Image (cartoon, coloured by chain):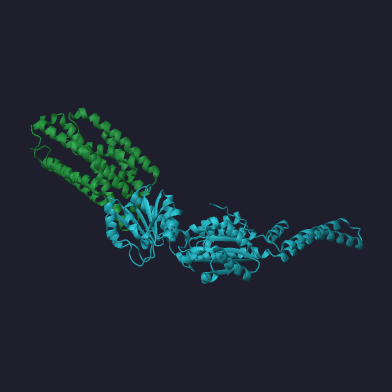
Chain colours: A cyan, B green
Amino acid sequence: MNIIVVGLNHKTAPVEIREKISFQSQIMEDAHRKLLETPGVTEGMILSTCNRVEVYSCVDDIESGIREVKGFLSAFHNLPLERFEEHLFVCFAEEALRHLFRVASSLDSMVVGEPQILGQLKDAYQNSCKYKAAGIILNKLLHRAFSVAKRVRTETRIASSAVSISYAAVELAKKIFGSLEGKVVMLVGAGEMCELAAKHFINSGIKDIYVTNRTLERAEKLAEEFKGTPVNFNEFHRFLPKIDIVLSSTGAPHYIIKPEDVTEALRARKQKPMFFIDIAVPRDIDPKVNDIDNVYLYDIDDMQGVIEANVKGRSKEAEKAEGIIAEELTGFIHWLKTLDLTPTIVGMRERAEEIRKLELDKALAYLNEISPAQVKVLESMTSSIVNKLLHHPIVALKTHAKDHYRDMYLEVARNMFNLVEKEKEEPEEALEG
Amino acid sequence: MLFNITLFLYLAATIGYISYLITLKKPISTASTLTLVVSFILHAAAITVRYPELGHPPFLGIETLSFLAWTIVGIYLLVEWRYKVYVLGSIVSPLAFILLLLTIIIPEGEIHVPPYLRSVWFPLHVGFAFLGNAIFSLAFAAGVMYLIQEKQVKGHHLGGIYKRLPSLEVLDEINYMCLAIGFPLMTIGIITGFAWAKSAWGTFWVVNPRAISSLVTWLLYATLLYGRSTVGWRGRRAAVLAITGFLIMIATYFAINFILGGHAVK
C-alpha cells in the first residue's frame, strides 16, 4: 500500500493557477467519486483551500498512481495537464506522510503557525469520510496527523506567533474602541493573515465586514465567506469613512493609503477613531498616518513587537516541531508495514502454533503412560484442527488482498489474532469542528 | 468622630484600589467599591450631623473641601457603576482622602456669616457649582488617563500601563458624559449665582476674580461641547481642554480661598 500526494500550493503555484484547480464544497462529492474511480486508487482525500489544492491517495503502484491522479485533476477541471503540470508537486511514501503532518501542524502554511489549516484539513477528512473515500489507511493517517498537530501545538510555541498577532490586533482594537460591537472592518487585500485576523474579529462581535481586492472575484469569494460586502478595489477609498478597522495586506509595491486619504475620511466621520493594521510587506499604508489624531497605525513589525516578548526563538520551536513529526512518522510507518499480507499470515500461523504447542504439552504432562505413536496421533490431530480453523480466514485474506477491502481485512485479522504490536496507542482524537 | 471613620475608610479604599491596579484581581476591586460606598454614606451622615453645629451650609471655608470630596466620590461611584472603570478609583479615593484630611487638620477659622449669604440663592448657586466641579474633576481624571493611554497605543508601547488603563473609547465617553452633564449644572450654578448677586447686592454682575474665572471656564467648556457635537472634537483635544478647564478651576479656587481670602470679595 502506498500513499501519494499530488497537488499545488502557495509555494509551487500562483493564485491564478490555484484557483483553476480548486474544488468548491458543492462539487466535493462528485470529485471524491471520480477520484475513487481512478484506476489504482483505493482511498482518497481532497484538501482544497485558498492556498493549496492537494490530493492525498492510497494507490497500488506509486508511478502509475501519480500519473492517474494527475490525469484526474486535469480531466475533472477540464484543463490540459501541460497548463499546470509544472506547478504540481508530488511526494510519496514517507515524504507524503511527512508532508501531511507538516501541513496539519501549520509548518507548511504561508503564515507558519496559523491554526486555520487544521480546521480545513478536518473538513477535508470529514468530506472524504462522508463520500466513503477514506478507508482504514486514511482514517489512521488523518487521526495521527491530528494528534501530531495537537502535540506540535501544545509542546511547541509555533502556533502562538500567528495567533497572537491577530489576538493582539483584537486586544488593541478593544483598547481603542472599547466594545467591538457594531464596529466595521475592511480587509484590503486578502492574505491568509488578514483572513485569520478577520476571523478573530468576527469572534469578538464584529458583524460588518467589507472586502476589497485587486481581483474582484477573490474579494467576492472572501466576502461571501465572512457574510461581508465586496468592494471594487478602485473605489475602496470612498468607503473609508464607514470603516473603523482596516486590515491591509496587498502586494502593492507602494503606499495605497496615504495621510490625506485618512484625514479626509476622518473629517467625514467626525474624527471617530480609526485603527489601521498593515500586514503587507512592502507596506500598504504610509507610516505618517500614525501622526494623525485619533488614528492608530500598526505595521507588521509593530505587531511583532507587541508579542515579541512572548515568542522567542521561533526557529528553535520549528525545529522542535520537525522533531515531533519525525518521531510520529516512525511510529506510523511501522504500523503501515504490518499491513502486508505475508507477515500477517505468518503471524497468524505462528500464534496458532504457539497455542497448539502450549496446550499439547499441558495435555501430555497429564498422560504419563503414553506411547510415541499415541503422541504422534495427538500431534497430527491438533495440527489439523489448527489448520482447518485457519484455512478460511487465510483464504479470505488472500481473496481480498486484491480488492478494495484489503487493508481493512488485514487490520481486522491482526486485531483478532492479537498481532497488533504493543505500540503505545494514544486515544484517537475526536473530530472537533 | 464620623469624619474620622470616613477618613479611615477613604484610606482603606485608596489602598484597595491601588492594590487592584497592581494585581488586577477582581475581588479586590469589589471590596474597594464596597468600602467606598460605605465611606460615601458615612460621609453624608457626617456632613448632615455637622450642619446644625455649623449653622450654615457646608459651603464655606474649609468645609468646602469635605463637601467637594463627598460630591466627587458620589459622581465617581455612578461612573464606576456605569462604565466599570475601577482604575479611576485609584485617583478618586486618595483625592477624597486628602481633601477630607485637609478639612480635619486645618483649623476651622472663625466663620462669620455675612447677611448676604443668607439668601436662598446662595446654597442653590454653590450646590450646583459644586456638582459641576465634581463632575469636571472626573473629566479631568479621565482626560489624564486618556492622554497616558493614547501615548501608549500610538507609540506602540503596550506594557503594564496599557494593560491597566481602560480603553480610549471609554475614557473619551466619560469625558463627554461629564461634559454633557457637568455643563448644564455649571450653567445653572452661574445663573443662580446671578440671581444670588441680584438678591444680595441688587445687581446681576459683581466683578470679582471668581466670577470672571467661572465665565472663562464656562466659555471653554461651551466651546468644547460645541466643537464636539459639530466637527467631532474628541479624544486628545477633548482631553486637553477638559484638563485645562479643571486646572483653571482649581487655580481659581485656591487663589481665591487662600490668597485673596474669600469668594465674593468686593
Q: As drawn, is A424 to the left or to the right of B21?
A: right
> Foreground residue, A248 or B56?
A248
Question: What residue do we see at 17% from left, 28% from top?
Answer: B55
Q: Assign the N terminus of chain B to one quadrant of the image.
A: top left
> Foreground residue, B253 or A66?
A66
Q: Is residue A46 above or below residue B106?
A: below
Residue A222's image quarter?
Answer: bottom left
The mark tally for this picture is 0
Q: Position of residue A198 (x, y in %)?
A: 42, 55
Res A324 visible:
no
Q: As drawn, is A403 to the left or to the right of A168?
A: right
Q: As drawn, is B53 to the left or to the right of A322?
A: left
Q: Is residue B54 above or below residue B207?
A: above
Res A46 visible:
yes
Q: Position of residue B64 (x, y in %)?
A: 19, 37
Q: Position of residue B129 (x, y in %)?
A: 19, 37
Q: Assign the C terminus of chain B to one quadrant of the image.
A: top left
Q: Position of residue B58 (x, y in %)?
A: 20, 33
> Foreground residue, A169 or A357?
A169
